[in-house]
Image (cartoon, rainbow, N blue to C red):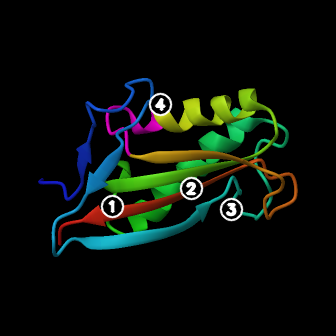
Amino acid sequence: MPRAVTLIRSPSLSDAAEYAYAATAPPGARLIFLAGACPLNEDGSTAAVGDVAGQAAKAVANMRTALADSGASLHDVISTRVLVASHRREDLVTAWGVVRDAFGDHDVPSTLMGVTVLGYRDQLVEIEAIAAVLD
């Protein structure tokens, strides 16, 4: 099945980044704007309290569900923003590792940010995403 997303890697920029620098979708692609995927269990409780990697994994799992319910998958994501409630770079890197591994070779343009607080009690990670699909 053809994909709408084309990843762009810039030979003019550092290859140290573990993601493509840009992505495009063709005219007529349907864009899907996801709410931030949070590490919430079905009962609304926060999963993996105190565990950045565990919360990142749960947020990815919830994002996969939202994408599937929208007719898409991780390979249809055109960009992400990963938010980590921490001032420690190590925590950001931990969350990023989980997200990066989930996407595999579909290394979409991404922004990784440390923030002071997120919306749910004990929440450490949230992942925003936009996807594009061909109907």
User: Hey, what amino acid is under mark 3?
Assistant: Glu
The magenta region covers 101-108
Residues at marks 1 and 4 touching, judged by CB atoms closer than 8 Å: no
Which one is closest to the eye, mark 3 or mark 2?
2
Comparing marks 1 and 3, which lies closer to the viewer? Answer: 1
Reading the image, the residue beneath label 1 is: 72
Q: CA distance from mark 3 to mark 2?
A: 10 Å
- Residue 42's tag is 3
Pick whichever, 3 or 89, lies toward us.
89
Q: Position of residue 65 (x, y in %)?
A: 48, 59
Tag 4 near tag 3, CB within 8 Å: no
Identity of the residue furthest to the front in this view = 12
Secondary structure state at the residue bearing disc 4: helix
Q: Residue at x 21, y 71 (%)?
A: 29
Q: Disc 2 marks which residue?
A: 62
- Look at label 4 and name its amino acid: Asp
What residue is disc 4 on?
Answer: 101
